[in-house]
Amino acid sequence: MDNLEQELQKDSAVEIVLLSEAAKLEKQDTSSKMSSGFTDIDSCIDGGFREGDFTVITGIPGEGKTTFARMLTLNFAAAGIPSLWFSHEMTSRELWDSFEKMGAQEDLISFVPLSLEDDLDWMLKHCDIAIGQHGVKAIFLDTLGDVVKSVKRQQELSNYATYLAQICKDLRNYAIKNRVMIFTVAHAVKNTRSRSNETDNSDIANSNGIPAAATNIFHIWRQQADPTAAKPENVTYVKIGKSRRDGTKKGFKYRFLYENHRLMPMGRDMTLAGTDYVEQGVW
């Protein structure tokens, strides 16, 4: 008997059953939909988020990724869905100030740990605590690159992208196992194909494997106000980079008016990716 066969015999056998039977035994509930609070976004993810969803919110720095995540938090809270934030980009004071500017009250059902460590195992341990003590259903990580304690510099690992991809798989598996939704902010590099700050899945920094693990991907960018306009408007765009449950909506873009630190829906943007793309024959 060779070594491989011996190892196989050591492992307990896993029962093989019909797919329909396995689905009935799975704890993950994909029938209950949790609204994003935005009708247009819900329509692109088959009616809303589900338990086990791993959602990536991406774009270049300063374009509104965290604002969009905070809007989801407020909308979930309005529906009685508690959230947990791991904010490495802001202190708890700064994060709360930003929520207050959006109109949040002190009873907002969003929680944070009193201190942070840049370690995935530490984070998941505290997710367990928040789920058990506060019934948390939505977990926000800002940003994905801040849970890599063992890698102080990117050069220390030969394939940083592979490492991040494995973290994404771990987060997705945790979401499924614990019946929660996980949202992570991931930085993108500047899209050189367009004059705007619009990004695509290939622009996600260290993107090998990240889009593959995601259930949903949202790209965020801003169009700055025209000071010469009669009524200057700051517009934020949200593009569907991926929806595992409704692939027909990939590339759909929606406009939001940025007003009073909130995002107000303005409907779908029916243009494609701009004249640059059309002229180059990309679309």
Image (cartoon, rainbow, N blue to C red):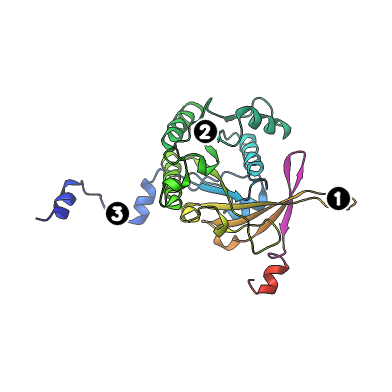
Residue 237, x across and y down, in percent: 69, 53
Q: Which residue is drawn at 69% across and 30% down?
A: 97
- Residue at horizontal 49%, vertical 53%? 210
Q: N-terminal of the two: label 1 or label 2?
A: 2
Q: Mark 2 points at which residue?
A: 136
Q: Distance between the residues labelled 3 and 2?
A: 33 Å
Look at mark 1 in the image and give the residue it sits on: 227
Q: Give the range drawn in magenta.
A: 257-274
Residue 138: x, y in percent? Answer: 54, 38
Query: Could you tell me the amino acid type at mark 2?
Result: Val
Taking the image as shown, residue 111 lies to the left or right of residue 7, namely right
> CA gap, disc 1 to disc 3?
64 Å
Indicate whether 60 appears above or below 131.
below
Residue 258 location in percent, x, y?
75, 45
- Which one is closest to the eye, mark 3 or mark 2? 2
What amino acid is labelled 1 in the image?
Answer: Pro
- Does label 3 or label 2 sit earlier along the sequence? 3
Rounded to the nearest whole Å, what is the CA distance between mark 1 and mark 2?
42 Å
Q: Label 3 sits on what residue type?
A: Val
Q: SS at mark 1?
A: loop
Judge whether residue 5 is colored magenta. Answer: no
Q: Is residue 183 left or right of residue 221?
A: left
* Quadrant of the frame with the N terminus: bottom left
Q: How crowded is mark 3: few (under 14 residues within 10 Å), some or many (20 or more)?
A: few
Q: Mark 3 points at which residue?
A: 17
